[in-house]
Amino acid sequence: QVQLVESGGGLVQPGGSLRLSCAASGFTFSAFAMSWYRQTPGKERELVARITTAGVSTDYADSVKGRFTVSRDNVKKSVYLQMNSLKPEDTAVYYCNAQLVGIISANYWGQGTQVTVSP
């Protein structure tokens, strides 16, 4: 079955770094664009970063540009989010997303991992 399993979340001080990982299984990973979203209580889930199938193109929310980097390894079927210079406002549950758009479409979500940025 399809699985997206996030890891790497935790508690970090402002200015610190974390690296999130998302391991995929059960689908053709290399055919899917991969994204990271985040959500805080009472707010809609927002796109943080996105990477195309071959990793050639990336896109970031304005709030994280220059601080976060998304990457993927199609051999390991994993996507990563390197988060540097973390701020308290980055505190959220981070979700991994896989999307296939075309004649056949599909959209998968992970269970989320908590990131807390606090002194």
Image (cartoon, helix red, strand yellow):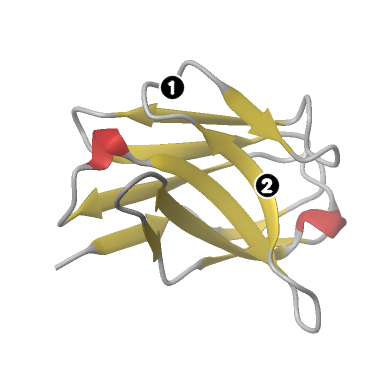
Q: Which residue is drawn at 67% across and 52% down?
A: 47
Name the disc covering residue 55, or none. Answer: 1
Could you give the CA–CA distance between mark 1 and mark 2, rounded to whole angstroms? 16 Å
Q: Residue at coordinates 35% horizontally, 41% vertically from top-left?
A: 32
Q: Which amino acid does label 1 sit on?
A: Gly
Contact (CB < 8 A) between labels 1 and 2? no
Screen quadrant of the N terminus = bottom left
Say which residue appears at 40% left-offset and 65% top-offset: 110
Where residue 57 sits, quadrant-wise, is: top right
Packing grade of label 1 (10 A; few <14, some 14-19, many >=20) is some
Type of amino acid at the residue the image marks with label 2: Val
User: Where residue 76 is drawn, which disc sits there?
Assistant: none
Say which label, 1 or 2, has the lower sequence index.
2
User: Dot 2 corresponds to which residue?
Assistant: 48
**Quadrant of the rendered image containing residue 70:** top right
Is residue 29 placed above or below 7 in the rendered structure?
Answer: above
**Most foreground residue, 83 or 50:** 50
Which x, y percent locates residue 107?
Answer: 40, 60
Where does the image place residue 26, in percent across and percent down from the top left?
15, 57
